[in-house]
Image (tube, rainbow, N blue to C red):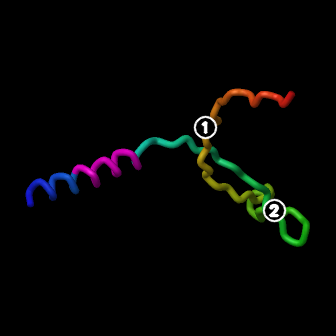
Amino acid sequence: MKKILLVLAMALGSQIVIADEPRETKKVCVDVKKDGKEVKDPKTGKTKQSCKEVKQHKKLEGTKVPEKK
């Protein structure tokens, strides 16, 4: 019984370690539009923006596909 619990604890522990890898994020902002016009902030007079944090994926390098003869 102790062996089964030990195996389960190790399996769950390894999943938590893998899930906590740091990921690179990028902040993307888009101007807010209503009825085709940009919305301005009344206090500052600047255009309002909607910003989100987006995960950045790594680009994988591969080999070139050979052309058919």
| Magenta stretch encompasses residue 18 | yes
Q: Which mark is residue 40?
A: 2
| Magenta stretch encompasses residue 46 | no
The residue most toward the left is 2
Q: CA distance from mark 2 to mark 1?
A: 36 Å
Q: Specify the quadrant of the image occupied by residue 61.
A: top right
What secondary structure is marked by label 1?
loop
State yes or no: discs 2 and 1 in contact (Cβ < 8 Å): no
Q: Earlier in the sequence, mark 2 or mark 1?
A: 2
40 sits to left or right of 52: right
Q: Main secondary structure of the magenta part?
A: helix
Residue 19 percent across, percent down from the top left: 41, 49
In front of the other: label 2 or label 1?
1
Q: Which residues are magenta?
A: 10-19
Residue 59 percent across, percent down from the top left: 64, 36
The residue most toward the front is 69
Which amino acid type is shown beneath numbered disc 1? Lys
The residue most toward the bottom is 35
- The quarter of the picture where the N terminus appears is bottom left
What residue sits 74% from the left and 28% below the top?
64
Q: Specify the quadrant of the image occupied by residue 44.
A: bottom right
What residue sits 27% from the left and 52% below the top?
11
Task: Quickly name the residue at label 1.
Answer: 58
Which residue occupies the foreground of this view, 62 or 34?
A: 62
24 sits to left or right of 40: left
48 sits to left or right of 22: right
Residue 53 percent across, percent down from the top left: 61, 52
